[in-house]
Image (cartoon, grey):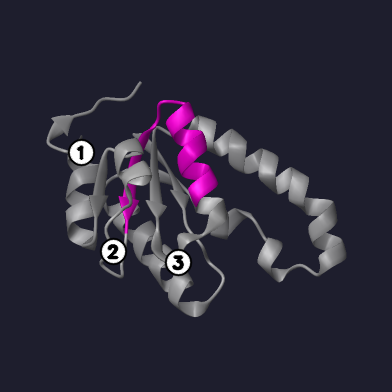
């Protein structure tokens, strides 16, 4: 089973809806998913709690980026955390797939780092299920 790390902002209802939709797509494509929205709780913490928990959450996210075979990154709203996760994944030679529910493309740095970009949930689901990105069959170990 492929392991997917879902990188995405989740700071407002629209972003949360996209994350939930992407979680569904990943589950339908028979992949195991790690979603920081489900595991990290920074958004519900007060400043003091954030200061205490942020290092632990950062370290867990790095561990899970290392665990994953594929990173699915929602690039809508240009979230700096998501951009960091894309760069980290690129440095680790991970398969990176970007997604925009708003129909945006990807800039040159993100498109060159990624193995595919999608704007339609069903297209992403098919690509994940088939492990095909940019027409090239990818395999992970």
Q: Is residue 61 magenta?
A: no
How far apart are the alpha carbons under marks 2 and 3? Answer: 10 Å
How many labels were placed on the picture? 3
How far apart are the alpha carbons under marks 1 and 3? Answer: 23 Å
Which residue is tagged 3?
Answer: 77
Boundaries of the magenta span: 83-99
* Quarter holding residue 103: bottom left
Residue furthest to the right = 48
In the rendered view, does 40 fall on the left or right side of 131? Answer: right
Q: Height in image: 68 above or below 18?
A: above
Q: Identify the secondary structure beneath mark 1.
A: strand
In the rendered view, does 22 fall on the left or right side of 34? Answer: left
Which residue is tagged 2?
Answer: 104
Whole-percent x and y of residue 34? 49, 47
Quadrant in which the C terminus is drawn: top left
Q: Residues within 10 Å of mark 2 (few under 14, many from 20)?
A: some
Give the foreground label among 1 and 2: 2
Residue at the spot 83% in from the left edge and 61% down from the top edge: 49
Give the foreground label among 1 and 3: 3
Q: Nearer the viewer, residue 61 or 2?
A: 61
Whole-percent x and y of residue 11? 57, 71
How far apart are the alpha carbons under marks 1 and 2? Answer: 18 Å
First in sequence, mark 1 or 2: give its number.
2
Q: Which mark is residue 133?
A: 1
Residue furthest to the left = 135
Q: Residues within 10 Å of mark 1 (few under 14, many from 20)?
A: some
Residue at the spot 52% in from the left edge and 35% down from the top edge: 88
């Amino acid at each position: 089973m492929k392991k997917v790390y879902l990188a995405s902002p989740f700071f407002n209802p629209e972003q949360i809806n996209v994350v939930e939709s992407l979680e569904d797509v990943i589950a339908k494509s028979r992949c195991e998913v790690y979603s920081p929205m489900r595991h990290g709780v920074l958004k519900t913490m007060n400043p003091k709690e954030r200061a205490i928990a942020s290092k632990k959450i950062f370290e867990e996210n790095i561990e899970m980026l290392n665990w994953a075979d594929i990173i699915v990154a929602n690039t809508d709203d240009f979230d700096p955390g998501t951009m960091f996760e894309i760069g980290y994944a690129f440095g680790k030679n991970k398969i990176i797939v970007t997604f925009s529910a708003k129909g945006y493309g990807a800039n040159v740095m993100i498109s060159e780092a990624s193995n595919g970009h999608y704007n339609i949930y069903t297209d992403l689901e098919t690509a994940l299920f088939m492990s095909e990105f940019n027409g090239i069959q990818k395999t992970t170990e």
